[in-house]
Amino acid sequence: AIVELVEETPFRWRIERQGAMRVPGVVFATRELLPDPSADQSLAQVAAVATLPGIVEAAYAMPDMHWGYGFPIGGVAATDIERGGVVSPGGVGFDISCGVRLLLADLHVDRLRPRLTALMDALDAAIPRGMGQGAVWRLRRTAELEQILAGGARYAVERGHGEPNDLDRCEDRGAVADADPGAVGRRARDRGLEQVGSLGSGNHFLEVEAVAQVYDEPIAQAYGLWPGRICLMIHTGSRGLGHQICTDFVRTMEAAMARYGISVPDRQLACAPVASAEGRAYLAAMAAAANYGRANRQLLGQAARRAFDRATGHGDLILLYDVSHNLAKLETHQVDGQARHLCVHRKGATLALPPGHEDLPPDLRPVGQPVLVPGSMGAGSYVLAGMPGAPAFASACHGAGRRLSRHQAMKTTTAARLRAELEAAGIAVRGASARGLTEETPQAYKDVDAVVDACQLAGLARKVAKLAPVGVVKG
Ligand code: 5GP
Ligand code: MN
Ligand code: MN
């Protein structure tokens, strides 16, 4: 289907309401960043999301948008809980609470260089990865899994995996409330038992980076981002456990929709009212998976600290922030001048709290939330900050976004060539199968500079610093 776009500004496009759409679609992007409809149906997906019961304002898409399961990746949609609003597992995605954590070392890149090989080897040895292979934490009892599902990063820290003040820098202080381990199915638990503290495969990574450019001095200073500073970025989620929960609940909701009189244009948009038994069970299981994902990043951050300590003597990395980019959250926002209780889906979109928001820790409150935006293993990454009065329920892009499918990406290069190019650019590479590496070639992603510029010009988040890759451990 060809979707017509109305240009509202050079950074904001509207899909007019038509057919079963309850609200318009709004896409934040420059003309160049808009998806090519011959290869990517994500604009049609925005229009389909706009039909969901209870949706308010608009179905939004971020500049890194691309095709996804049901919802586009880079999609944001909020439904009004008190007016029949639904929750849709496809609006969260399969990797529930996938997200990014950024730690800061007290180390300049020039001083790391002589130790870089040792550091990369130490990280290579310390970080379990690949499909379902081993983990930092071997759970002895299922009771331990329950505590992770209920307590997230908070439980990991209680058990000695990290510093108590790490939690000040975690979204929701490391654990989502209202998690119910009882809502997590048997198969999901089984898959989860063996994977706490593991990176996963493909797009997931652990990357050593250095601050390459500062755009906003005062905010960079508040975040501790000085030129040359070594950072460590971790991108992973809830592994097989989250995936299984999504699979289970898509099925449950498909079967339940008719009972609630809901019809959707695409089965992948299966949903149920937030206030229904199915909706509540999904949110309780989703919260448990989110806690699993947060514990996972906490454990990997701690394993990385030990590797840094062994290789460089600087194991005291400070956590800048940890934030999810696949989650539905119950939030209160002003809609048409009224405070409404909403279920905000962010799928491949990052929460971006503005300055002054009460959910921010006191030291970050004056400047706004760090928004962590990975680019690709060659192109670098960004730290942005939440902006006052930002649209789309305080959300921003979550990456550069895929431009080529995995299959197309495979055809553009070979693993050997890619590895040689990265090494020649001074970027150390560890891990990754030949196939995993080529699927993740920087060419497979959009231009991250253009994506974050569009974010800033659209008023979603402001640029604080750019981070250049130094070494990457790929899943
Ligand atoms: P996703 O959560 O959608 O799988 O990925 C988020 C973003 O991470 C992608 O859109 C891409 O821009 C970025 N990304 C993927 N692989 C890498 C990598 O190896 N290093 C960095 N810095 N970013 C990556
Ligand atoms: Mn993920
Ligand atoms: Mn992700």
Image (cartoon, rainbow, N blue to C red):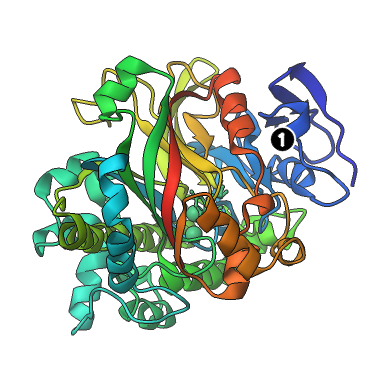
Q: Residue at x 35, y 30 (%)?
A: 369
Above or below, 204 against 450 in this view is: below
The answer to whether residue 336 is left or right of residue 235 is: right
Mark 1 secondary-structure assignment: loop
> Where does label 1 land, which residue?
22
Residue kind at label 1, given as amino acid type:
Arg
Residue 14 versus residue 421 in the image, above or below: above
User: In the rendered image, which quarter is residue 134 located in?
Assistant: bottom left
Q: Name the image quarter holding residue 13.
A: top right
Taking the image as shown, residue 221 lies to the left or right of residue 458, namely left
**Where does residue 48 sit, x and y in percent of width and height?**
74, 46
The image position of residue 443, as x and y in percent, is 68, 51
Q: In this rendering, does residue 15 appear at all? A: yes
Q: Residue 427, percent across and down?
A: 47, 53
Q: Position of residue 224 (x, y in %)?
A: 25, 29
Q: Is residue 296 visible?
A: no
| Neighbours of disc 1 within 10 Å: few (<14), some (14-19), many (20+) | many
196 relative to 64, above or below: below
Q: As rendered, which of 118 and 464 lies closer to the eye?
A: 118
Labels in figure, total: 1
Q: Residue at x 54, y 75 (%)?
A: 433
Rendering quarter of residue 430: bottom left
Give me the residue at 69% from left, 29% from top.
29
> Of residues 366 and 400, which is closer to you in this image?
400
